[in-house]
Structure formats: C-alpha cells, structure tokens
Amino acid sequence: MRSYFASKLRDGINCFCVGVENEKIREKRVEMRIAICDDNITDLRIIEEYCNKYNENYEVNLFISGEDLVEAFQEQSFDLVFLDIEMDGLNGLETGQILRSNPSKPIIIFTTYSGDYAVRGYGIAVRYLIKPISYEEFVSSMTAAMNYITPKKLCVCDKGMQRFVPVDSIVYLEIFQHSILIHLVTKEKIQIRGTLAELVEQLPANKFVQPHKSYLINLEHVDRMNKREIIMTNGELIPIGRSKSDSFDELLRKFMRGDSNEYWN
C-alpha cells in the first residue's frame, strides 16, 4: 500500500507530508485512491489497516484535518473518502460539502461516535459508520461504495470464455429459467449462469435498479414509462412490480436530476 500523511502541528503531532513507497510498491497497480480524514490518530490508523487488509493495491492518503484534505483535493482527486464528522476546525459535514461541490465528486463514508448526524449527512455520504468500527462493518461499507466506484466493464463467462461487457452497453438483465439473460444495445443476448442478486452486487447501484423481481434495468436506457411498464431504448417492455412502483419512480426522478448517488444504503 502506498500511504501519504499530511498534517498540521496539533496535539504534539509533527507537521510532515511524506510519501512512503519502495520499488515493489511502484510495480503494483493502484486500483483506487482513498483518503482517510480523522483527527483521532488511533481511529485513523484502524481504517488504514482495514484498507490494507481489504486490498493492498489501494493508494491510501491520511489526513488529520478537513483543511488538509480540502487543500490536497485541489491537486489530486480521490475515489473514496472516509471522513470523521467531529473534527476541530473544518468538521466532516463542512468538509464533505466542499468535496461534493467539486466536479470530481468522491464517494464519502462518514465516521463518528454519535448517531445524531445521520439526517444532516444525507445527500453527502453513501454510508455512515458508528465508531468503534469493526472490520465486518468496514467491508459492508466498502461493498456499498464499490457499487458507485465501478469498473466500466462487467466480466462474465460466455461459452467457456471470459467476456468483458461494457456496462453502458447493457440495456437490462432478466431471469430466464435458471440463468440470466443480459440484453445489449446491439440486440445481442448473453446467457450466463448465476442469480440476479449476484449481478446486482457487481453493477453500479446508482444506475441499475429493479422495477420487478425478475428484471434489473439500466436507467440510462429508459425511454418511456407509465404506471405499469417501462419502455427501454431498444423498444422492449419491462413490467413494474406493484411493490416497487413508488420506489422505482423516486429512483428514476433522482437519476434524471443527477443526484442518484445521494443515498444511504
């Protein structure tokens, strides 16, 4: 793991900004850039340890103030930010609002010892972790975050070969007998083994939603709809389940407004 630590002189902590890396680390591919911001050094190191355990190829940057993080963000972007709310100076809510106002919006996970900030944090973070944070809770939050920070292609097994399908080319997926059919913009259908639930975990939650228990659709390819069905851009009709009608309508409206990743999962 490549790790950077930026800090100001506070509580006996020396001010330094040092890159720690070696030749082996340089050879590793950086899969994601993460920032952890917390003025409690113990909590800061715990999240860093969890990141290292989860994936050693993540680049992790450590900050002990919101001011330091905002300053660093002007020079480099981060895919994911673990942000403590209760910090001196610029607190986590204020820092998160500044980061989210940037064109390069990072995914934010709030950390705190209090549960009083959940409503105020809505629209800024995708998760809210109460300290002390267990590794299991960390993994759950990473799974949620990765639904937003996703690869541009979906890897599936097609006729004994690994196939990399561009996510944007997927119109919708449907349960077909004991397998899944992936419908592409080219009109091609890829049949794979597995469950819809497994694919839900691999596709971006802010774009792919279930209007019906048997279908997972790409909101980018919704053309028209009424109360009972959706017409996709390829002309095919997708039913809307009674129990999912209201939630789907709200998700679609948020997606059209461009704020579809403002959810607590």
Image (cartoon, rainbow, N blue to C red):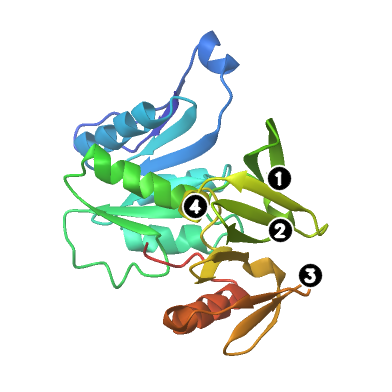
Q: Earlier in the sequence, mark 4 or mark 3?
A: 4
Name the disc covering residue 147, or none: 4
Is residue 55 shown left or right of residue 215? Answer: left
For residue 49, what is the image quadrant?
Answer: top left
Q: Earlier in the sequence, mark 2 or mark 4?
A: 4
Q: What amino acid is labelled 1 in the image?
A: Val
Tag nearer the camera, 2 or 1: 2
Name the disc covering residue 85, or none: none
Is residue 101 shown left or right of residue 38? Answer: right
Tag nearer the camera, 4 or 1: 1
Residue at mark 1 to residue at mark 3: CA–CA distance: 17 Å
| Residue furthest bottom as drawn | 227
Q: In this orientation, which residue lies closer to the viewer: 1 or 90?
A: 1
* Mark 3 crowdedness (10 Å alpha carbons): few <14, some 14-19, many ≥20: some
| Residue furthest top as drawn | 23
Query: Contact (CB < 8 A) between labels 2 and 3?
Result: yes
For disc 3, the marked residue is 234
Q: What amino acid is labelled 3 in the image?
A: Asn
Q: Earlier in the sequence, mark 2 or mark 1?
A: 1
* Mark 1 crowdedness (10 Å alpha carbons): few <14, some 14-19, many ≥20: some
Label 2, secondary structure: give it.
strand
Where is residue 199 shown, x and y percent of the image?
53, 50
Name the disc covering residue 165, or none: 1
Q: Earlier in the sequence, mark 4 or mark 1?
A: 4
Label 1, secondary structure: give it.
strand
Where is residue 116 shown, x and y percent of the image?
19, 68
